[in-house]
Image: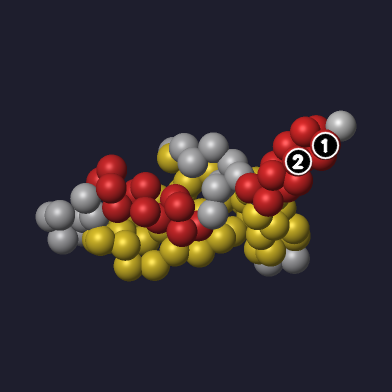
Amino acid sequence: MQTIAKVLLLSFCCIQIVYAGKEFALSALTLDQVTKKVIEQNKSKVMGAETEVIDGKTVYVIKVLTSDGRVQYLNVDAETGRLIK
């Protein structure tokens, strides 16, 4: 029984409650974790990042400066960390 309680407690600690606009949403990844992942994978400079709720889904919108000097916005699913096209 203690093991189950510990697993549940750990699970709740790993989930972050994010307030975006007027809605509450649960996300498995933090904005900081996703931003670091974008930097590592794209070798881009992050200029800004914010949390939004789009169609009921928590999405991280990350503004990056690409290596060729272009500004690009990336929408990343907060639950999976996958890029939304």
Q: Is residue 50 above or below residue 42?
A: below
- Point out residue 81 in the picture as x, y percentages from the top left corner: 49, 41
Q: Is residue 34 above or below residue 71?
A: above
Residue sitting at 36 percent across and 61 percent down? Answer: 63
Q: Secondary structure at mark 1?
A: helix
- Point out residue 34 in the picture as x, y percentages from the top left corner: 44, 50
- Label 1 – label 2 distance at C-alpha: 6 Å
Q: Is residue 83 above or below residue 26?
A: above
Quadrant (top left/top right/bottom left/bottom right) for the C terminus: top left
Q: Quadrant of residue 30 in the image? A: bottom right
Residues tagged 1 and 2 counted as in contact (Cβ below 8 A): yes
Residue sitting at 61 percent across and 45 percent down? Answer: 28
Residue sitting at 69 percent across and 57 percent down? Answer: 17
Q: Amino acid at mark 1?
A: Gln
Q: Nearer the viewer, residue 55 or 10?
A: 10
Residue sitting at 69 percent across and 64 percent down? Answer: 19
Q: Is residue 21 left or right of residue 30?
A: right
- Which color scheme does this rendered protein use? secondary structure
Q: Amino acid at mark 2?
A: Lys
- Point out residue 83 in the picture as x, y percentages from the top left corner: 43, 40
Q: Is residue 25 left or right of residue 4?
A: left
| Tag of residue 19 | none
Q: Residue furthest front?
A: 2
Q: Nearer the viewer, residue 76 or 27?
A: 27
Q: For the residue carrying disc 1, how many other residues have a C-alpha within 10 Å: few (<14), some (14-19), or many (20+)?
A: few
- Pointer 1: what residue? 2
- Pointer 2: what residue? 6
Q: Is residue 20 left or right of residue 72?
A: right
